[in-house]
Structure formats: structure tokens, C-alpha cells
Amino acid sequence: MHIGNFLSGELKKQRITIAEVAKAVNKSDTGVRKDLEKDSLHQSVIEAYAKVLGMNIYRVLAEDYEGNSYPTPEERPHPEVSDQDVPSLQSIPTKGIEVLSVNIAVPSDKQEAFLKLLMS
């Protein structure tokens, strides 16, 4: 996937201007235009653009890798998840299964994105 073309297309679909993006990602208009011409970008740069677009870039990349198309913002479901929807460890049957606990250190500004990635 040519990431610049993809991002450019999404910006056009959502009618977000280069100036708006530049302000949101703290770059010049020229810097944004140059990024949109590139076929690859650093992960942090892609994440900044994805945040402006309001999309899960990891799902987009996974679906591209698997040969699926990414739904437009209008087609994307917005499920509401409550604490009642998430089973506790005590309610999960554990016969023959050992519970494994893993601690992962994630910067506070990336925690929400990381949790969404884990739950997708």
C-alpha cells in the first residue's frame, strides 16, 4: 500500500484540508504535502495522520495485508462496550487452562490506541 496515496484519499473523502492537517500534526503545509507523496512513513507520523482522520491505521494495514477493503467512516460500526460486556477472569472457565498474567508498559498517550488494537 502506498501510504501517502491512502492518506491523501482519506483526507479527500473526509474533506479535511492540508492546512487543517498541518495544524493538527504540527507541520507546515509543504511538509504534509511531501509526506502524502511518500510510499512509506515512520509509524509515529502515520499514527498522527490516522488520529486526524479518526481511524485505526493498524486495522487498515491488516485488512490491506489480508486483501480486504477498509470501510469508510460511514460504514464503520461504533460499538459501545461496557464493563458488563467484558468477562472477569473469575467467570471464564479455567479447567485445563492456566491463567497467564502479562504486564506491558505503554506510554500514557498511546494506551487508548493500544487497548483498541488489543480488542480489535
Image: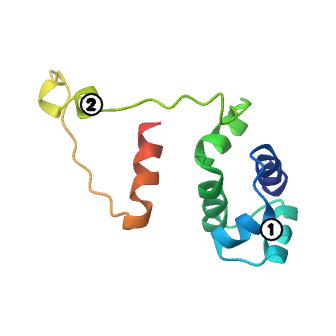
At x 63%, y 54%, the residue is 50
* Label 1 or label 2, whichever comes before in sequence order: 1
* Residue on which the image places disc 1: 35
Q: How far from the left and from the top, in percent, is residue 112?
A: 41, 53
Q: How far from the left and from the top, in percent, is residue 6?
A: 80, 49
Say which mark, if any, is on residue 7.
none
Element marked by disc 2: loop
As drawn, 117 above or below 28: above
Determine whether, in the image, residue 100 is placed left or right of residue 6: left
The residue closer to the viewer here, 1 or 86, is 86
Q: CA distance from mark 1 to mark 2?
A: 39 Å
Q: Check disc 2 and give the amino acid type.
A: Val
Determine whether, in the image, residue 88 is placed left or right of residue 11: left
Structural crowding at the residue carrying mark 2, measured as other residues with C-alpha within 10 Å and reported as few (<14), some (14–19) or many (≥20):
few
Say which mark, if any, is on residue 86.
2
Element marked by disc 1: helix
